[in-house]
Image (cartoon, helix red, strand yellow):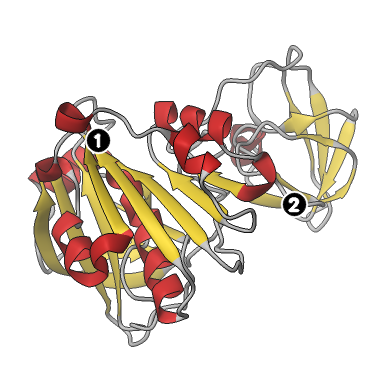
Amino acid sequence: MQQTTVDRIDQVAENAVSLVLRGTAGPLAPWEPGAHIDMALPNWLTRQYSLCGDPDDRMSYRVAVRYERLSRGGSEYIHRFLRQGRTLDVSLPRNHFPLVPAPEYLFLAGGIGITAVLPMLRAAAASQVPASLVYVGQSAATMPFADELRAAYGRRVRIVATREQGRPDFGALAAGLNPATLVYCCGPEPMLTAAVAAFPPDRLHTERFHPVAKPFAASTEFEVLCAKSGRTVQVPADENLLDALTHAGHPLPSGCREGVCGSCELTVLEGEPEHRDDIGAPAGRMYACVSRALSPRLVLDL
């Protein structure tokens, strides 16, 4: 973890604030567009937020948080109780939504999804790669950083306020794309569903706020061998791997507990995991909060 201090809190839209977190012990860990951090809040909750500042600024991170009416405690605490000067621990940046080199980009952002996309647009512009952004929200007043984007990128940014203009036609956008253009989309589920329907899967990169419901076979019990400690842990059918390991004395970092943040990543040495995450676990890795085992036993690097 890295220790930071809340340097600034700014209102950036209706029900949305940005936080500038300054490292208390010097430079913070580097990051690239698409990265996020876990933020440990003083109310004992850990939440994930996309980094939306400047990767060249090693002294501070910027994130933005929308107040959720049905908040589970994270956005409510930040909006109602967090104050300038408060010390917060944050994780090293993780990136499951990296910007792949391409000759041209189309960025699609919905609401607070702009936080993941904004540094990508900045990076493309700095590299003089053609790029455009379609930024969608209910109204301009609800869209964080809309003025900043207009001022910096002009016509490359199209602001779509759906209350007045309706939803953009992704099919028409797809029909007019250069065949080499990569599309990056972050926003609410209806927007992602529309993007998946409109753009070729090999050219579309998405990041979700919440996992997509998928069917899996009924959970069954399996065994885990922790290679370093030699301890064997039984994982019952009605308990996830993360909790079973914690109860056995192997607590892991955990944030979303939904398979979207990656904070509980484990290295699998033997056995076949059943991946139930939304990230796409790389070979030899799994996420303990949701994933299970297809083989009777897993050997983990613990």
**What is the number of the mark on residue 186?**
none
Say whether residue 299 is left or right of residue 20: right
N-terminal-most mark, 2 or 1:
1
Q: Name the kind of residue labelled 1 in the image.
A: Gly
> The C terminus is located in which quarter?
bottom right
Instruction: Name the residue at the front extreme.
Output: 176
- Few, some or many C-alpha atoms within 10 Å of disc 1 (few <14, some 14-19, many ≥20)? some
Say whether residue 208 is left or right of residue 12: right
Image coords of residue 252 (percent x, y):
57, 49
* 129 relative to 40, above or below: below
The answer to whether the residues at label 2 and label 1 have Cβ atoms under 8 Å apart is no
Say whether residue 44 is left or right of residue 229: left
- Residue 296 found in image quarter: top right
Q: Residue at x 67, y 34 (%)?
A: 241
Q: Residue at x 46, y 36 (%)?
A: 172
Q: Name the kind of residue labelled 2 in the image.
A: Pro
Q: CA distance from mark 2 to mark 1?
A: 31 Å
Does dot 2 land on a helix, a strand or a loop?
Answer: loop
Q: Residue at x 28, y 71 (%)?
A: 4
Instruction: Name the residue at the bottom extreme.
Output: 26
* 70 relative to 47, above or below: above
Q: Nearer the viewer, residue 102 or 72?
A: 102
Which residue in the protein does label 1 denote? 73
**What is the number of the mark on residue 282?**
2
Question: Can you see residue 163?
Answer: yes
Does dot 1 land on a helix, a strand or a loop?
Answer: loop
Q: Nearer the viewer, residue 47 or 201?
A: 201
- Few, some or many C-alpha atoms within 10 Å of disc 2 (few <14, some 14-19, many ≥20)? few
> The N terminus is located in which quarter?
bottom left
